[in-house]
Image (tube, grey):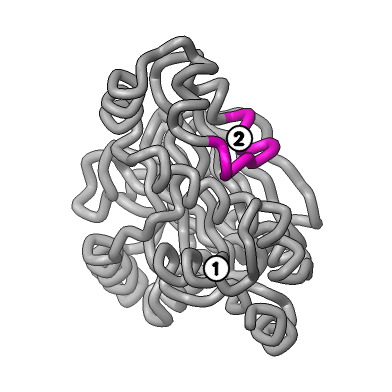
Amino acid sequence: MPIKDPASVEHIPRPIVGIGNEYPPAFELDWHEHRRGQLIYAARGVVVVSTPHGAWVAPPERAVWTPAGCPHSVKMVGAVSTRSVLIEPDAEGSLGDRNKVIQVSPLLGSLLAAACEIEPEYDVESRDGKLMALLMAELAIAPTVPLAVPFPRTAAIARKCQAFLERPTPHDTIDEWADDLGIGRRAFTRMFRKETGLSLGAWRQQACILVALPRLAAGEGVTTIAFDLGYDSASAFTTMFKRRVGVAPSHYHPNGLIGEMTEA
């Protein structure tokens, strides 16, 4: 029987514990934090994790890492099945002190599902303990994928970024952003890259992906989404999406064939 309440396992003396839950469409978990780090994996559906520092999205085959003590909220897109783990901050399998999205291989996905069926106070020398050790080893080598939209520390720029997420305006130029903020172009670009680790162009592409993924999962057409996000064609959007995510947008559409037909 999967453990459903993270609070019930927070103080169990094991380096890693699995928790599993089923959520209805559009369900939201309000702001909270954990003593342990949490890897949220949606075996079905899409999850969007928000923190004071940005937003991270995890469609199938991806998972979001939230470090220990980091306040966050979670929004479910579609019906969601989570198979997640809580990890002690000093455990070898911990994924560090920064939010990120990792790729979930078929093996890692199976291990996460199995972890949620293991009693939290498992014997570390037993088969269950060895399975958990293998899971931690796989987490340590899981590649990071660019499905993060970090917010700048400067409040005015962060508000501008939040407004972009709510209503993307991808054709606005760097000069327009800088003018709106009352900052010189060079100072703005330097500050933006320093505070997010990304150029404005790269940040906006990742923001468009974050906006698009829930809509794709909900069954909206690629062409409609592409035009809404300011792209001149579905193929231009698909090219950007493939370059950033590694797969076409149709990969996340409930009917992949229809999605592919609309990308041409």
User: Residue 230 at x, y = what percent?
Assistant: 65, 52
Q: Which mark is residue 164?
A: 2
For the residue pair 162 and 218, the one nearer the viewer reads as 162
| Mark identifier at residue 236 | 1
Q: Residue at x 40, y 13 (%)?
A: 183
Image quarter of residue 201: top left
Whether residue 135 is visible: yes
Left or right, 94 with reference to 247: left
In the displayed structure image, the side of residue 77 where residue 113 appears, left or right: left
Spatial CA distance of label 2 from label 1 is 20 Å
Kind of residue indicated by mark 2: Phe
Q: Quadrant location of the N terminus? A: bottom right
Residue 242 lies, in percent from the top left, at 46, 71
- Which residues lie in the magenta part? 162-172
Does residue 65 lie above or below 155 as drawn? below
Labelled disc at residue 140 = none
